Image: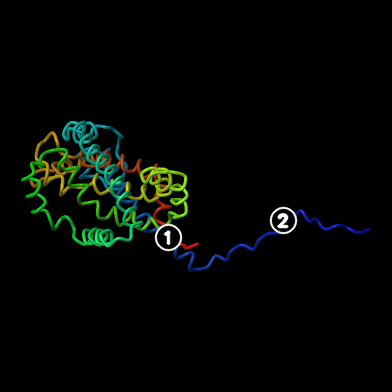
Amino acid sequence: MRFRKNTNRKEELPSQPYTKGTLCIQIGMTLVAILFIAPIFIILNYSFKGKKELYLSSPLSLPESFNLDNYIAAFKKLDLATTFTNTFIYTAVSVVILAILCGTTAWAIARCSHRFFKFCYIYFIIGILIPYQALFLPIYTIGYKLHLTNTRFGIIFMYVATGVSFGVFLMNSFMSTVPLELEEAARIDGCSVFRTYISVVLPILKPAMATLIIMQSFQIWNDYLLASLYVSKKELKTLTVSIQSLFSAQSSDYTTAMAAIVISVLPIAILFLCLQKYFIKGMTVGAVKG
């Protein structure tokens, strides 16, 4: 009597050997993750502590009671209704303008072979090499003469001007992922230049746009130097400038400042979580050539 072999049985694949190198990498990555998480945990922990616990308890010890007094104090002292709104307006408007300008400019530079466009690309590259912190005096002088200081338009204009060089450089590196055949097919079908960009090019550049939006949002939302230089009116101040007022040589309200820091981090964290998929894809485009 013959027995048939069970052909439906799946062959077990040999497990990968667990080497010492893999173990060392995992231990190292775990230590790095702890180093990054520890400051975040301490800030969040102190935001719920009272002033006595701030000086008497350990930074890693949990608060005696989770109260929201520090968050209420931060809302009152920093006038968060105004400063949070100002920061959101500056960031959102600046990022939208940068996404539109950088995308169209990079597309024009990548698709046009004229010397003028090559010169423009080199010009934007030079703009990256010069930090805007080194140009504070001419920036303020130009803004003052054009009556842009202490205005919403002025601070937004300066954020766009200081971020456009990096944005064009970033978007131009992604233009190689857009097949020219798709653009040519769209033009044959009767699409105009703007229609081709909006319907064909822009959907392919979603990862690049997400990367640009996240990186510029981080920079503008957390900016202190340019906001403190251009804005002196209380009703136009940003959240970062207001938080700095809690730290002084005479007295410092650390617990309230920690609560304000937690509040300021939440919008950027939510933005990153929403665009995380596109951001990771955008950062890895071009790493592997197919």
Q: Which callout, 2 or 1, points to the residue nearer the camera?
A: 1
As drawn, 217 above or below 50: below
Residue 21 x, y percent position in the rendering: 48, 68
Q: Residue 3 appears in which quarter of the rendering?
A: bottom right
As drawn, 169 above or below 143: below
- Residue at image position (43%, 50%) is 183
Q: Amino acid at mark 2?
A: Lys
Q: How many marks?
A: 2
Q: Is residue 12 shown left or right of residue 127?
A: right
Q: Nearer the viewer, residue 130 or 67?
A: 130
- Disc 1 residue crowd, few under 14, some 14–19, many 20+, Cα 10 Å: few
Query: Which of the labelled discs sits on residue 286, or is there none?
Result: 1
Query: Which of the labelled discs sits on residue 190, or is there none?
Result: none
Which residue in the protein does label 2 denote?
Answer: 10
Residue 134 x, y percent position in the rendering: 13, 58
Q: Amino acid at mark 1?
A: Gly
Question: Which quadrant does the N terminus fall into?
Answer: bottom right
Task: Find the distance from the CA under tag 2 to the CA under tag 1.
Answer: 37 Å
Type of colouring: rainbow
Does dot 2 land on a helix, a strand or a loop? loop
Residue 128 x, y percent position in the rendering: 23, 59
Q: Earlier in the sequence, mark 2 or mark 1?
A: 2
- Residue at image position (24%, 34%) is 71
- Residue at image position (82%, 58%) is 5
Residue 59 x, y percent position in the rendering: 27, 48
- Disc 2 residue crowd, few under 14, some 14–19, many 20+, Cα 10 Å: few
As drawn, 137 above or below 262: below
Q: Is residue 45 shown left or right of residue 227?
A: right
